[in-house]
Image (cartoon, rainbow, N blue to C red):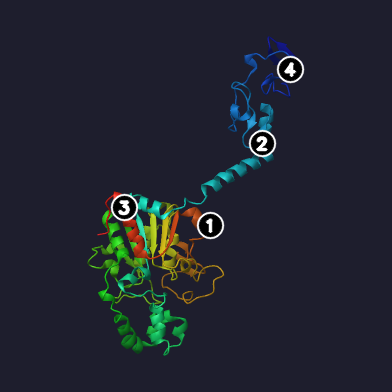
Amino acid sequence: AVLLQVNGALSAMSSACPVCDGSGLLLTDSCPLCCDQDGDADDSTSSNSSCSIGGSHEAAGLAPGSVNHWCDVCGLDLQSSAAMAEHVQGRRHLKHVAGSTATKRLQRTQEQPTLTEESFFAKLAGGAFKHIVVLTGAGVSTAAGIPDFRSPGGMFHQIRCTWGSRFPQLLHSPEMLLSRHFARSQGQIYENEVQPWLRSLKWNSAEPTAVHKFCAWLQRQGWLQRVYTQNVDGLHLHADLDLPDDFVVEVHGALRNDSVVLYGDDIPRRFNTCCRQDFPKQPSESGVDLLMVFGSSLQVAPFCALPNMAPRGCTRVLVNMDLWACMVNDWSPCHRAGPYADCAFGGLAQTPGLARLAGRDVQLRPLWRDLTAKKRWPQLLVEGDCDAFVHRFFDSPTAAAFNLTLT
């Protein structure tokens, strides 16, 4: 091309300069191919267009008003519009764009903020959670004098001591005493000996604990959506608490009305109905923003799947005397088959590791330590007494500031 300089401006007779794209500038200096070494390009030769990739003059090290052909994605100065147009269609640039998209996607799935007990108490006392689901196990009733199942001196220990000599299989699997198979195969013994023995534990005289009162307190605040309990003691519906029946799902039935669910029995239909309401098939439709687990080691299906039904972003809190016991169960990878793996629950289509609940497949294994959990839910895991945790909340500075009391 024959290039002529007219009044300090450039005019291309057949094509633009391959170095400066006809701008007369090379970065902030005059292009030596188009302009005299000591000549300055006129303002009219400068282009004010900027890179469509999103770069700025400052990012490319250019002065305002200068040409900018800087690619932010690749970190390159392409020098000309033609080179930029060719570059953005190239394999290298597109690969970097894909990598940038993946990085942004990864940033969106980074671990949820770490919760401390103090920060959680502050959010709870401040009313940050409006739709709370509480899951309770035997550990919440031990303070009422009702033994849990797995602790030293608990229900399974008592079953072994009382019944193990007559039924040796109970030494290995004490829960089988509470199974439908045992009730059918040993009908007279179950009716005349086992049931009276269970009633002798005097559960009817037990009084609600701090956790039971806490659930009722949440309902009075207008924050409780549901309580799911494995316990058959009926303490969540104790008359002193005045907690409406609609808020409580007794997953394993209750002694007071002879509706106890034995191993091998169907789960009450209301359990699945409430699961559909609280944890709809489309997680985005769920309003649950806090799920708390008290006193359950999450070993029995389908109850153990409930924490995994929490929608993304829902805060999950686990309080138990032994956290390690909550980290694995019979559906955990490489975990030996245990007594509950063979228990069939009517109405639940189960595959290894999954249960069909509320119209969707849900993991039965605990996900508290799983990388998925850390990305999906803000979590707080507390090893200790459940009642003590509740009392610490009401003794916290934020609860005191709002004049919150358990009674």
- Near-viewer residue (145 or 352): 145
Q: Which mark is residue 371?
A: 1
- Near-viewer residue (319 or 385): 385
Question: In whole angstroms, how far apart are the C-alphas of marks 2 and 4?
Answer: 28 Å
* Left or right of 253 in this view: 316: right
The amino acid sitting under disc 4 is Cys
- Image quadrant occupied by the N terminus: top right
Residue 393 in the image: state x and y as whole percent.
34, 57
Q: Which mark is residue 34?
A: 4
Q: What residue is shown with label 2? A: 89
Residue lying at 62% horizontally and 40% vertically, measured from the top left: 97
Q: What residue is shown with label 3? A: 399
Residue 243 in the image: state x and y as whole percent.
26, 62
Q: Between disc 1 and disc 3, whose residue precedes?
A: 1
Question: Which of pointers 1 and 3 indicates the residue nearer the eye?
Answer: 3
Question: In whole angstroms, how far apart are the C-alphas of marks 1 and 2?
Answer: 37 Å
Q: Between disc 2 and disc 3, whose residue precedes?
A: 2
